[in-house]
Amino acid sequence: MKKGILIAIFVLFLLSGFMGCHRGSRHVELLSRDTLIEVLADLHISESAFRLNQIGVGNQVMVRRNAYFNWVLEKHHITYQQFDTSFKFYLTDNERFSKMYDQVINKIKLRILDNKRTPKEEQVRRDSIKKDSLQKIVIQKAALRKDSIRMDSINKVNLKLAAIQKEKVKQDSIKNASQKKAAYKKEASINESLKKSLLKVKADSLKKDTAKRKKVVPPPVIKKKAPALIK
């Protein structure tokens, strides 16, 4: 069945049947795109089941149709208001809604294929899925183990680098302390040498002064006056 015809029939089906016993939509949380696709696929399948098993007349038909519809809502744990509001919201964008229905049709086809499988084929399919799941688990565990080993290696390297850095800081500290001590010692030695030099200069100066004081000065020469002549 073509997609356009499928959409048209489904919209008409909702307007004429399922929506008949519900109140109008109100502001509710929209369903996600994927959830609405699952719901629409189930509604189409329910519609087919309803038509294949259609019995009764008048209100009985309406009651049975709504029973199928409500079963789908309960299966997905949603309300009619959520479905109605979401359906109308996605319907406003024709291109988006058309792409969604492509996926709806694909899901219906897959479910039809599932129903046509023999028990043996179904078992093979389940075994394949189980095998794939186990392989994924093994791959995930291997990846986790690899990541764990890598993280351990990184941690060990970081610890080693931290130890090296700590030792370097320690050695630099010891070296700086030794250099400061040597500088202080050198400065003290220079100061001591200067002090000795100053003391020596001072001692030499005092010695010279003392020598000058002890030096004997000759007495001054006194000239005698000549005696006066007696007249």
Image (cartoon, grey):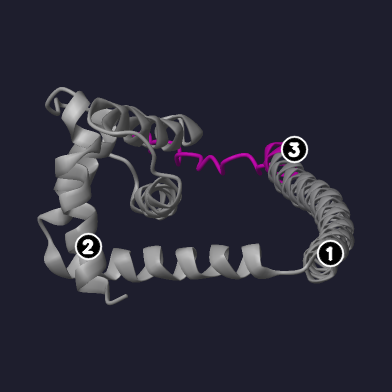
Residue lying at 89% horizontally and 61% vertically, measured from the top left = 149
- Residue named by callout 1: 123
- Residue named by callout 3: 214
- Left or right: 141, with 108 as reference point: right
Q: CA distance from mark 1 to mark 3?
A: 134 Å
Q: Looking at the picture, which amino acid does disc 3 mark?
A: Lys
Residue 13 belongs to magenta span: no
Residue 48 placement: quadrant: bottom left
x and y percentages locating residue 46 in the rendered image? 43, 47
x and y percentages locating residue 111 in the rendered image? 56, 62
Q: Looking at the picture, which amino acid does disc 2 mark?
A: Ile
Residue extent of the magenta highlight: 207-231
Residue lying at 80% horizontally and 56% vertically, measured from the top left = 165
- Residue named by callout 2: 7
The label number, if any, that marks residue 181 in the structure image: none
Q: Looking at the picture, which amino acid does disc 1 mark?
A: Gln
Which structural element holds mark 2?
A: helix
Magenta part mainly helix, strand or loop?
A: loop
Choose between 64 and 90: the one closer to the eye. 64
Instruction: Point out the tag, 1 or 3, that comes first from the N-terminus.
Output: 1
Choose between 195 and 200: the one closer to the eye. 195
Residue 231 placement: quadrant: top left
